[in-house]
Amino acid sequence: MIKFGTGGWRAFIGEEFTQANVRLVAQALSNIIQHENAAKNGFVIGYDRRFLSDKAARWFAEILAGNGIKVSFINRFVPTPIVMFKAKEMDCHYSACITASHNPADYNGIKVFIQGGRDADEVITQKIESQIAELQDSDVQLIDFDDARDNGLIEIINPMNEFVDSIINFIDMESIKKANLRVLIDPMFGVAKNALQTVLINGRCDVDVINDGENPSFGGLMPSPNAATLYRLKHLVAAEGYDIGIGTDGDADRLGIIDEEGHFIHPNEVLLLLYYYMLEYKGWKGSVVRNIATTHLLDKVAADHGEKSFEVPVGFKHISSQMEADHSLIGGESSGGLTIRGHIKGKDGVFASTLLVEMISVTGKKLSEMLDEIYGKYGYAYTAEGDCTFKPAQKEALYNKIYVEKLMPKFEYDVERISYEDGAKVYFRNGGWVIARFSGTEPLLRIFSEMEDQSTAESMVTQMKAFLAL
């Protein structure tokens, strides 16, 4: 069965991610496009550096072309944000990128985008799933890639320069040029290097790169920029005197940041830094949108500046929809994805990283100094998290315990309320919280807690794990 989660369809290569299934997804989407008369502005396809991504992109394009849909094919690995950028520019009703983002190396997948270059919502993904369920192999229509290109149904494009220029035009490059910063990039064997390095070199930064090149196993690590996977970046930034270390995930839509002392800056803190910087130093206005597992300190920053904060379910489609509804300034999530008003409507690790470099340049303050300034004003909070694996046979029992029976541990803190909008989130009267929810991209149960200090937050995660017997 082909099922879409919070970040597209992701599956094990060779088991579910196969040529036949990629073609089924493409045919289902082609049927939807034809039914909605949505082929006028064409369809953009891109792919990342994963095993089979380039071939799968060709398989996908052959089906669209076989259904008479004009394809703009990016014929080199690129960040997912570039696909979204080009789709937005062309006003495509639909577009796609072959990627499994930060998943392990034995996964691949497909992210589908809708008009404006936004992540497809559940309405669209459910339509795709319904179409797939009705398809037979004989329903699949295709044209050989080279024949489709010769016939003008597939056009080869490279929007890298346009994307880079859009960031350069948005960012205060003059301030960056004056700062003479040293930057170390870790693309985690993914696709960020070319775009990010080009932008920063235009800002006269001294840029070095580690963990580059083609490596289908991602060096034996998950291409997810966190405190554990960025251990080499942390060491080198501190040891060799870089101003900032930037890690990006496999398709460069998420980031992980290392400060000048070699400390990992949690994605919650990245959101705090950028929102505070834009309100306090740039004088911009606008609300913030965060998902249900992201720091509540953003609410305090917003309120202090007369702005609103919105909480939405996990999945960037919810963030981009709410941002559009309120014309919000920034939206993001605790997994490292964020976007800014005026840029693309999806996550972009390249753009967010560049904006952090601008922040350091404009304020003249180090990352650690900016965080101290924020915590001095709004207090400190620590986010702890734990991913729990489970056997398929356990999922029903876990689901029933959390969602049906609605059982919870006996907490030592007063409970204000419990929300089941996305997972089970317990809000405490002291402002802290803990949440347990099933991942939409991997077979995991994720537990997050934010409390006044590290030991308390970690104890809440431990208590929840013990209660669920994980």
Image (cartoon, helix red, strand yellow):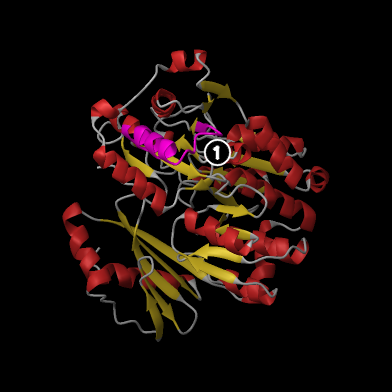
Left or right: 41 in relation to 62: right
Q: Is residue 456 above or below residue 32?
A: below
Residue furthest bottom as drawn: 414
- Is any atom of residue 206 visible in this view? no
- Is any atom of residue 323 visible in this view? yes
What residue sits 76% from the left and 40% below the top? 203
Q: Which amino acid does label 1 sit on?
A: Cys
Residue 67 picture quarter: top left
State the image coordinates of residue 368 (x, y, percent, origin top left): 66, 60
Q: Is residue 136 above or below residue 400?
A: above
What residue sits 28% from the left and 29% below the top? 139
Left or right: 373 in relation to 86: right
- SS assignment at label 1: loop
Left or right: 303 in relation to 61: right
What residue sits 57% from the left and 54% below the top? 338
- Taking the magenta stretch, the answer to whether it contains residue 144 is no
Quadrant of the rendering where the N terminus is positioned: top left
State the image coordinates of residue 331 (x, y, percent, origin top left): 58, 59
- Looking at this view, is 12 or 421 the one in front? 421
- Taking the magenta stretch, the answer to whether it contains residue 40 is yes
Quadrant of the rendering where the C terminus is positioned: bottom left
Residue furthest left as drawn: 393
Q: Is residue 203 above or below residue 430?
A: above
The stretch in magenta equals: 24-45
Number of on-image labels: 1
State the image coordinates of residue 251 (x, y, percent, origin top left): 50, 39
Read off the residue under disc 1: 92
The residue carrying pointer 1 sits among few (fewer than 14), some (14 to 19) or many (20 or more) residues within 10 Å by Cα, namely many
State the image coordinates of residue 159 (x, y, percent, origin top left): 62, 30
Q: In this view, does 454 lie above or below 360?
A: below
